[in-house]
Image (spheres, rainbow, N blue to C red):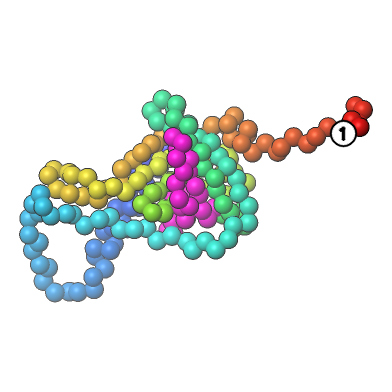
Amino acid sequence: MKSNLKLIVPAVLIATALSACGSSGSKSKPETAPTPTAQQSAPAPETPKTMEVNNIERTKEVAYKCGPNGTDPLNVMYGFQGDEPVIAQVKYQGQLTPGLSRIVGTGNDVNGFWGEGVAWIANRANYANIDKVDGNMLTIRQQTVVNGQNQVVDNIITKSCVLDQTATAQLNKAPAKPAKGKGKAKK
């Protein structure tokens, strides 16, 4: 499933970008583009379409272990409307992302979230099981030079995020209630 997810998410992002290229509506002879030079920039990847989130009804926080050795902790606070996660906020290396809205049309096996150039992709889940399934990756859209050409790309910040059951259980533990007194009250 993880290997499928690693293939599906980039494929969804590529398909989204390519669909925009093919929807110009013009049937005229295609123009030949000039060969890019170091001064030219490639077009930026398309911004994913996200859900409009006006309110959330409840939240649940999930902890993941990311990276090749599973040693990088990452936490996500999910916001829900009904049973569906509609927004996420990621905490990684002491930094919080903005609120990331749910990406529309990511398919049946992933939940994707996007906002201000940041994306969080996790396995498909709902309120009942979001604290029982793995995440996937955190990316940030940045400008970089590729083959001498300025390009805007989605850089992977961390990936291979798996559920940290112990840390997740601690995050969602109800606060302890004060013990009802067998001791004497202070005057």
Would residue 177 be found to the left or right of residue 88 on screen? right
Q: Is residue 168 above or below residue 17?
A: above
Q: Amino acid at mark 1?
A: Lys
The segment highlighted magenta reads: 85-112
Q: Nearer the viewer, residue 162 or 41?
A: 41
Q: Position of residue 116 (x, y in %)?
A: 38, 54
Q: Position of residue 72 (x, y in %)?
A: 44, 30
Label 1: which secondary element: loop
Q: Locate residue 15: give its quadrant.
A: bottom left
Q: Is residue 99 above or below residue 22?
A: above
Q: Locate residue 170: give its quadrant.
A: top right
Q: Is residue 113 above or below residue 157?
A: below
Q: Position of residue 100 (x, y in %)?
A: 46, 52
- Whether residue 61 can be seen here: yes
User: Is disc 1 surrounded by few (<14), some (14 to 19) or many (20+) residues within 10 Å?
Assistant: few
Figure quadrant of the N terminus = top left
- State yes or no: residue 8 in magenta: no
- State yes or no: residue 89 in magenta: yes
Would residue 7 be found to the left or right of residue 27 on screen? right
Would residue 66 be found to the left or right of residue 172 on screen? left
Which residue is depicted at the point 22% across and 45% down? 144
- Whether residue 182 can be seen here: no
